[in-house]
Image (tube, helix red, strand yellow):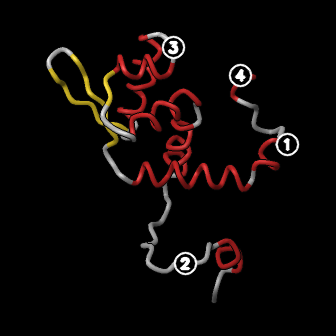
Amino acid sequence: MTDRATTATAPPAREGVEEVPCTHLGTVAKFFRALADPTRLKLLEYIQRGERTSADCVAYAGISQPRVSVHLSCLVDCGYVTARRDGKKLRYSVGDPRVADLIVLARSLAADNATALTCCTRIPDSERR
């Protein structure tokens, strides 16, 4: 006998995509929270275009070195970015090419849903935090 609730909520299978059961929704939510900060997203988009030093990131983001370091550490800790030592400098790069795909997809989805996202009152704009 099939459980109707399970059948009704199961997403359709996509061709060519391996289905991985999501047993850790908290981890997935944390994955997205790491990208929810506009500064981290800005830095990630910048780094995906090529390897960068923290000084490069400070100049690009226009914020202080300590704040950039905190954001870069978060991106490294969450696995979006890798850091390698080059003398006294750390050089940052995107460790997984799927990150670029994710950003492109997110921008596309946000553009397609811009009106709804603008009107959404349940999630505050980052500027109002």
Q: Nearer the viewer, mark 1 or mark 2?
A: 1
Residue 85 image-quadrant placement: top left
Considering only order in the chain, which callout, 2 or 3, is on the residue closer to the N terminus? 2
Residue 73, given in percent of the width and then of the height, sits at: 38, 25
Report the residue marked by disc 1: 119
Residue 117, given in percent of the width and then of the height, sits at: 77, 45
Question: In the image, is residue 62 above or below residue 16?
Answer: above
Considering only order in the chain, which callout, 3 or 4, is on the residue closer to the N terminus? 3
Query: What residue type is disc 1 on?
Result: Cys
Considering only order in the chain, which callout, 2 or 1, is on the residue closer to the N terminus? 2
Query: What residue type is disc 3 on?
Result: Ile
Residue 95, given in percent of the width and then of the height, sits at: 31, 44
Q: Quadrant of the N terminus?
A: bottom right
Q: From mark 3 to mark 2, how far is it between C-alphas?
A: 43 Å
Query: What residue type is disc 4 on?
Result: Arg
Asked which secondary structure carries label 2, the reply is: loop
Considering only order in the chain, which callout, 1 or 3, is on the residue closer to the N terminus? 3
Q: Residues within 10 Å of mark 1 (few under 14, many from 20)?
A: few
Considering only order in the chain, which callout, 4 or 1, is on the residue closer to the N terminus? 1
Report the residue marked by disc 4: 129
Report the residue marked by disc 2: 13
Considering only order in the chain, which callout, 2 or 4, is on the residue closer to the N terminus? 2
